Image: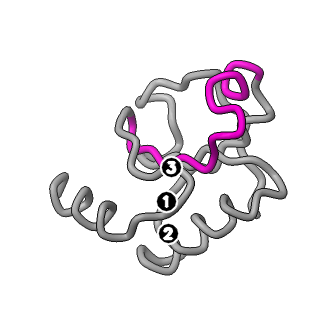
């Protein structure tokens, strides 16, 4: 799994490197599966920032064991399992 970037506890949308953020942790099978499914659907050039919740106490407290979580700014798209239909509908809606 790619390394997560260090970010502030709750980054504001204008501070993020990407529109999409995957909150995850190392050695998380579900996190790896969600990232692989996301890349399979959207392509490997799809921009998603991977944030390791264990690297920040506020994120660790917020998410605990409830990862992976895929967000588009303030909108939660997927939690635990990747939902390709939900993401496709979301991407269509914001275009």
Q: Residue at x 75, y 26 (%)?
A: 56
Kindly state the secondary structure of the residue where label 2 is placed: helix
Q: In terms of sequence position, does the residue under pointer 1 or pointer 2 come before the other?
A: 2
Residue position for label 3: 79
Q: Position of residue 7 (x, y in %)?
A: 66, 30
Which image quadrant is residue 92 in?
bottom left
Relative to 22, say whether 2 is above or below: below
Q: In terms of sequence position, does the residue under pointer 3 or pointer 1 come before the other?
A: 1
Q: How many marks?
A: 3
Magenta span of residues: 57-73
Q: Position of residue 81 (x, y in %)?
A: 52, 61
Pointers 2 and 3 in contact (CB under 8 A)? Answer: no
Crowd band around label 2 with a 10 angstrom C-alpha radius: few (<14), some (14–19), many (20+): some
Q: Is residue 11 magenta?
A: no
Residue position for label 2: 38
Q: Position of residue 87 (x, y in %)?
A: 33, 62
Q: Residue at x 54, y 46 (%)?
A: 69
Q: Residue at x 75, y 47 (%)?
A: 25
Q: CA distance from mark 3 to mark 1?
A: 18 Å
Q: CA distance from mark 2 to mark 3?
A: 13 Å
Residue position for label 1: 47
- Which of discs 3 and 1 lies nearer the camera? The answer is 3
Pointers 1 and 2 in contact (CB under 8 A)? Answer: no
Camera-nearest residue between 33 and 43:
33
Q: Is residue 58 magenta?
A: yes
Which image quadrant is residue 73 in?
top left
Kindly state the secondary structure of the residue where label 1 is placed: loop
């Amino acid at each position: 799994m790619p390394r997560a970037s260090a970010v502030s506890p709750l980054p504001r949308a204008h501070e993020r490197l990407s529109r999409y953020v995957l909150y995850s942790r190392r050695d998380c099978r579900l996190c790896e599966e969600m990232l692989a499914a996301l890349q399979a659907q959207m392509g490997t050039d799809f921009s998603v920032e991977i944030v390791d919740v264990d690297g920040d106490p506020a994120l660790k407290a917020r998410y605990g064991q409830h990862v992976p979580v895929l967000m588009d700014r303030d909108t939660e798209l997927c939690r635990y399992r990747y939902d390709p239909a939900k993401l496709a509908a979301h991407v269509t809606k914001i275009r």
